[in-house]
């Protein structure tokens, strides 16, 4: 652990391609206090690809990018060529399942799960981006959490392979031109184009000192889909407690399963109770979009709310979690980029 790093905080360094790396180090006390300078194993990678062909994008491109990434990751990581992962002798040692299809643990202190969050988020271009002309740049983000950070060379290679083969219905090709790592430190360029490799860099998110405010606004950019008993909640049914419960649950599972940092535990109940006391103002609308599910062999309509959601009240204990949610996203289908928001505090942005 780096000298001077707060106790109980993982210090994550990403080696250059070809170097080895272990899991992020963890100590005590628990990370759940989210104090200023608490370091978390999270980083956003901004990809810029130069398209060789025209690329047509759906209304919400997160599903397309996630699907192409997953297919390329499986082709790259799979050593057996088996049609399905289930029953494979190498399942426990293969990076594909735990990156893209993380198996649910048999037991967990929160509850039993049929599925758990994967340690990545694809952040697609904005909803109004429908075409990238040949010769123009496509930009999107990939957020990595926990031990997925140490697989960044494999992940980058898989993305390069997907675009080298071509994506979308027209199999539009492109090549990686730039990758920038974003944390709370100044962004750094981590792509050596000449050698087609990731260069060594630090990849840890440090909690900032957040100001004392009475209001915080979520500018929700991609559909936020919160559910109750399997049914999506419209704007009128949303409550601050619903938002925080979903965010805390997601953060707890991500850091517990993918960074071995432990679950939030009883702290979640206290924070959810505080969230219930908040008042709020909303300017939200429902946004529907369609995707084809290769697993279910049918077209599915998904949607969620977009717009602004302002929370007021005693925000001090809750603000760090709202800030963190800008990286993790929140709600259903977060891995394909849904539930993205920018946090704006009284007097200026917090991101």
Image: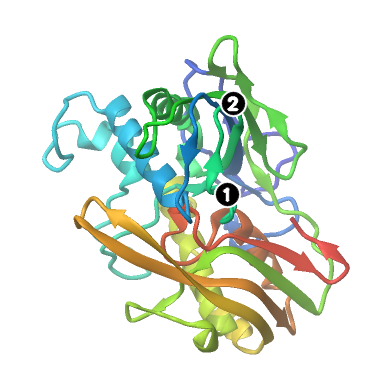
Quick check: 303 left or right of 306? left
Report the side of 59 relative to 293 (left or right): right
Q: Is residue 47 above or below residue 40?
A: above
Structure colour scheme: rainbow
Q: Which mark is residue 135?
A: 2
Q: Where is residue 222 drawn, in percent x and y?
A: 55, 62
Q: Nearer the viewer, residue 173 or 303?
A: 173
Residue 111 visible in the picture: yes
Q: Position of residue 324 (x, y in %)?
A: 63, 58
Badge 2 vs badge 1, beta-carbon distance below 8 Å: no
Question: In the image, residue 347 lies at what x, y percent?
Answer: 88, 68
Counting every numbered tag in the picture gives: 2
- Crowd rating for badge 2 (residues with CA inside 10 Å; few <14, some 14–19, many 20+): few
In the image, residue 28 sits, relative to residue 23, either above or below, namely below
In the figure, residue 328 lies in which quadrant? bottom right
- Please tell me which residue lies in front, 5 or 19: 19
- Mark 2 vs mark 1: which is more N-terminal? 1
Q: In the structure shown, which secondary structural element does the residue marked by tag 2 occupy?
A: loop
Which residue is tagged 1? 129
C-alpha span from label 2 to label 1: 16 Å
The disc at residue 346 is none
Residue 164 drawn above or below residue 273: above
Residue name at image x 19 percent, y 55 percent = 297
């Amino acid at each position: 652990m780096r000298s001077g790093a707060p106790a109980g905080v993982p210090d994550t360094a990403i080696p250059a391609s070809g170097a080895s790396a272990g899991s992020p180090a963890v100590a005590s006390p628990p990370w759940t206090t989210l104090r200023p300078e608490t370091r978390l194993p999270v980083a956003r990678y901004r990809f810029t690809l130069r398209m060789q062909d025209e690329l047509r994008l759906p209304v919400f491109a997160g599903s397309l990018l996630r699907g192409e990434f997953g297919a390329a990751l499986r082709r790259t990581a799979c050593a057996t060529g088996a049609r399905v992962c289930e029953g494979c002798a190498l399942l426990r040692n293969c990076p594909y399942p735990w990156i893209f299809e993380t198996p649910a643990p048999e037991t967990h202190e929160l509850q039993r799960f049929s599925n758990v969050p994967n340690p990545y988020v694809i952040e697609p271009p904005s909803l109004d981006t429908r075409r990238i002309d040949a010769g123009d740049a496509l930009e999107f983000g990939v957020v990595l959490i926990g031990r997925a950070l140490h697989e960044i060379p494999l992940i980058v290679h898989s993305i390069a392979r997907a675009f080298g083969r071509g994506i979308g219905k027209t199999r539009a090709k492109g090549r990686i031109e730039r990758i920038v790592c974003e944390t709370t430190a100044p962004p750094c360029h981590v792509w050596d184009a000449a050698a087609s490799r990731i260069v060594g860099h630090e990849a840890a998110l440090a909690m900032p000192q957040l100001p004392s405010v009475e209001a915080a606004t979520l500018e929700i950019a991609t559909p936020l889909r919160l559910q109750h008993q399997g049914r999506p909640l419209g704007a009128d049914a949303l409550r601050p407690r619903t938002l925080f419960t979903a965010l805390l649950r997601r953060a707890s599972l991500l850091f517990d399963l993918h960074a071995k940092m432990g679950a939030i535990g009883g702290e979640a109940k206290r924070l959810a109770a505080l969230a219930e006391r908040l008042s709020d103002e909303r300017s939200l609308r429902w946004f529907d979009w369609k995707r084809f599910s290769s697993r279910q062999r049918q077209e599915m309509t998904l949607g969620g709310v977009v717009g602004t959601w302002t929370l007021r009240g005693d925000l001090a204990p809750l603000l760090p979690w709202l800030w963190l949610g800008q990286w993790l996203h929140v709600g259903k289908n977060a891995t394909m980029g849904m539930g993205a928001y920018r946090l704006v505090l009284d007097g200026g942005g917090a991101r």
